[in-house]
Image (spheres, helix red, strand yellow):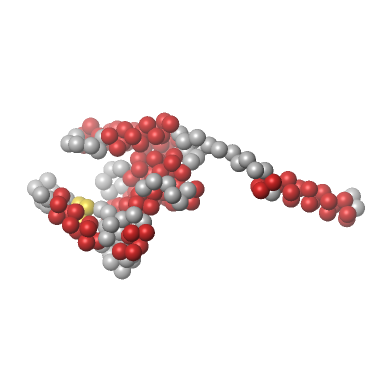
Amino acid sequence: MTTHNYLIALLAMLFACDPSANETQPQFEDNSDLLAMHDADQADRLGQIDWSSVAPRDSARRERTAEMLNDNLVVTAADYYHAAMIFQHGVFGDTTSARRAFDLMETALALDSTVENGKWLRAAAWDRYLMYKGEPQWYGTQFSRPGADEPWALWEVDTTQVTDADRLANDVPPLAEARARAENMNR
């Protein structure tokens, strides 16, 4: 092959690989099974919650979601959001599930920075991960109640990590509102 023919072949390959040359990009549909599990997860958190019934369902949803992730059935930003919410509801103290929720939200937002409630869930997952590690949270999304007869309180916040402007940019209320929420939870 002459140098001239080689350059022509190379240019042809480059144009063939140029994504702008192909105007239609593959479109993926949201995973309807994952959406149904997300909706069931949210329904389990309405009204008076019987944790002895909800906890096994949460566990089964996390197991099935992990299978879907392993089988590459989680593809769209919405899928990653739904998976993140399911992992956000891991067992209290489960740093692995909390970190996975955060990582899944990072992927969701990389795919679509406008995914509904995405920035808030990413912040909440990060806060929960820190809380489960016994460290102060950054955004102020997590509350704790040491005992059934004790009041709710905002989990300790490291106020040096993010500002109220950062919170607002992540769809999280300012710290003053989070503290007021803790007071309202005890009424």
Residue displayed at 23% across by 37% down: 46
Q: Judge left or right: residue 181 versus residue 129.
A: left
**Is residue 71 something one can see in this rendering?**
no
Q: Residue lying furthest front in this view? A: 23
Residue displayed at 33% across by 60% down: 167
Residue 57: quadrant of the picture: top left
Residue displayed at 67% across by 43% down: 22
Residue displayed at 25% across by 38% down: 45
154 above or below 81? below
Judging depth in this view, the residue of 77 and 21 nearest the camera is: 21
Residue 101 in picture, x, y percent from top left: 38, 47
Total numbered labels placed on residues in the image: 0
Residue 129 in picture, x, y percent from top left: 32, 53
Residue 56 in picture, x, y percent from top left: 28, 33
**Is residue 36 something one can see in this rendering?**
yes
Residue 17 in picture, x, y percent from top left: 70, 47
Q: Residue lying furthest bottom in this view? A: 160
Judging depth in this view, the residue of 70 and 50 nearest the camera is: 50
Judging depth in this view, the residue of 11 and 72 nearest the camera is: 11
Q: Judge left or right: residue 114 versus residue 28.
A: left
Q: Judge left or right: residue 128 versus residue 64.
A: left
Q: Judge left or right: residue 4 versus residue 137.
A: right
